[in-house]
Amino acid sequence: NDNAHIIDAVELATASMSVWLRTQALEQSLEYKGVTTRVISTSVREESDTRFLIGLEAQQEWSSESLDNPGALQKELKQRKGRVELVKVGDEWKVNGFWWEN
């Protein structure tokens, strides 16, 4: 996918977060690997006029092509907790940081 997910995320991020996002580019491969993340719940941990810290709980489905059976997918579910920092840049809210806690 030529790292399209990073290009999409950069538009939602602050300048400093965009620099970090670009370092996360993945090398292209013929083997399929993917992660689908579903946010289950969110909560405001801290808030001000210019900054929010949001806690979240998510379920991730990790998929990869089976080495024993090409074309077949192996799937694994993981429960995760994390937090995201949003800051106001002009009239827009941008992601300034994201951290998984487990």
Image: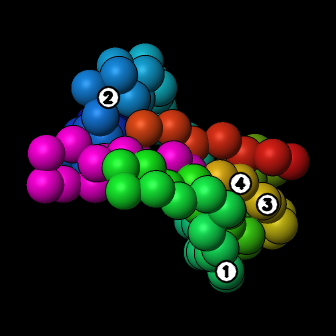
Q: CA distance from mark 1 to mark 3?
A: 11 Å
Residue 2's x, y, as percent?
28, 36
Say if mark 4 contacts mark 3, CB within 8 Å: yes
Q: Secondary structure at mark 2?
A: helix
Residue depicted at 61% across the width and 57% down the height = 46
| Residue that badge 2 annotates | 18
Nearest to N terminus: mark 2 or mark 1: 2
| Magenta stretch in the rendered image | 84-95
Tell me: 92 left or right of 2: left
Residue 14 in view (yes/no): yes
The amino acid type, in three-letter code, at marker 3 is Arg
Tags 2 and 1 touching, CB below 8 Å: no
Q: Magenta region's main secondary structure?
A: strand
Q: CA distance from mark 3 to mark 2?
A: 23 Å
Q: Which mark is residue 16?
A: none
As drawn, 56 above or below 26: below
Q: Residues within 10 Å of mark 2 (few under 14, many from 20)?
A: some
Please, which residue is most extreme toward the bottom here?
A: 40
Task: Residue at 67% x, 80% y: name it.
Answer: 41
Q: Is residue 50 left or right of residue 37?
A: left
- Asked whether residue 87 is drawn in magenta, I would say yes
Q: In whole angstroms, how far apart are the C-alphas of marks 1 and 4?
A: 11 Å
Q: Which residue was labeled with disc 4?
A: 82
Which of the pair 75/57 is nearer the observer? 57
The residue positioned 29% from the left and 34% from the top of the image is 14
Q: Nearer the viewer, residue 62 or 15?
A: 15
Residue at x 39% of width, y 29% of height: 17
Residue of label 1: 41
